[in-house]
Amino acid sequence: MACFANGEGRSILLNMVKAIQGHKEYLGEVDGLIGDGDHGMNMNKGFTLYAEELGEDAVTFSDGLFDLGALLLNRIGGSMGPIYGTVFMEMSDAANEMEEVDLPLFAAMMRAGLEGLYDIVDARPGDKTLVDTLHPAVQSLDADARQGTAFRDALANMRAAAEAGWKSTESLMARYGRSARLGERSRGVPDAGATSCKLILWAMAEGIEALLR
């Protein structure tokens, strides 16, 4: 069964950092359409700080997720710090320091991240939040893990599910956050959190694919 070494997590984590850094302006523009416009700035600040503090050190995927999550939780503004911090730290805990990460374990990590998020927010699919990206990605991984799908194919399916979930937010009405005050006027624009979540999941998948053996 295909897997990747937990100890090679540095390249996955830095791929996630690069995805946020490369799209900080876009995330700010999306957020500015119906929010306060600081999503790109805050996310870039947190992910860049993580990369700077990591330096040249090696790190496991699970430890890196925990450290990134803790930094986001404690050191960036807005609602996204606690949200992403919780997701990443719960994913880390679910890895249980395993030396190798296969599809069932990765699916369990993602499921733990989503369930941890559900413990701190009321948003659910259809509410125009990052849940609309994360939830279908987790469902896709769970289904592929049960069916014994090849890890590489499951990652492709996860990316497609995340993309579809992100796109769905454009037609939804916001129910949480600053954009919820706009009511029907919040339709027609994708959610900023759903957008950053798609970028992160795609970057994570690409990083994992490069390490599969």
Image (cartoon, rainbow, N blue to C red):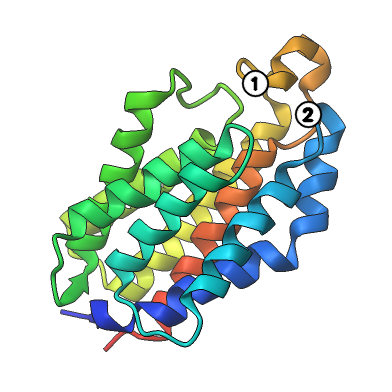
Q: Amino acid at mark 1?
A: Gly
Instruction: Label 2, secondary structure: give it.
Output: loop
Say which quadrant the C terminus sits in: bottom left
Tell me: 176 left or right of 87: right
The spot of residue 30 in percent (x, y) is: 80, 42
Q: Amino acid at mark 2?
A: Gly
Tell me: 5 left or right of 78: left
Label 2 neighbourhood size at 10 Å, few (<14), some (14-19), many (20+)? many
Residue 177 is marked as: 1
Tell me: 27 left or right of 9: right
Q: From this viewpoint, is residue 132 visible? A: yes
* Residue located at (29% from left, 72% from top): 151
Tell me: 141 left or right of 187: left
Q: Quadrant of residue 118?
A: top left
Which one is in front, 145 or 63? 63
Instruction: Label 1, secondary structure: give it.
Output: loop
Q: Quadrant of residue 65?
A: bottom left
The spot of residue 172 in percent (x, y) is: 67, 24
Query: Are the residues flagged by discs 2 and 1 in contact, CB closer than 8 Å?
Result: yes
The spot of residue 82 in percent (x, y) is: 47, 37
Which one is in front, 94 or 48? 48
Q: Earlier in the sequence, mark 2 or mark 1?
A: 2
- Real-space CA distance between mark 2 and mark 1, rounded to the nearest whole angstrom: 8 Å
The spot of residue 131 in percent (x, y) is: 49, 34
Q: Is residue 86 above or below residue 209?
A: above
Q: Is residue 27 above or below residue 177?
A: below
Write down the residue under mark 2: 35
Q: From this viewpoint, is residue 136 visible? A: no
* Residue located at (47% from left, 87% from top): 56
* Residue located at (35% from left, 77% from top): 9
Q: Is residue 97 above or below residue 36?
A: below
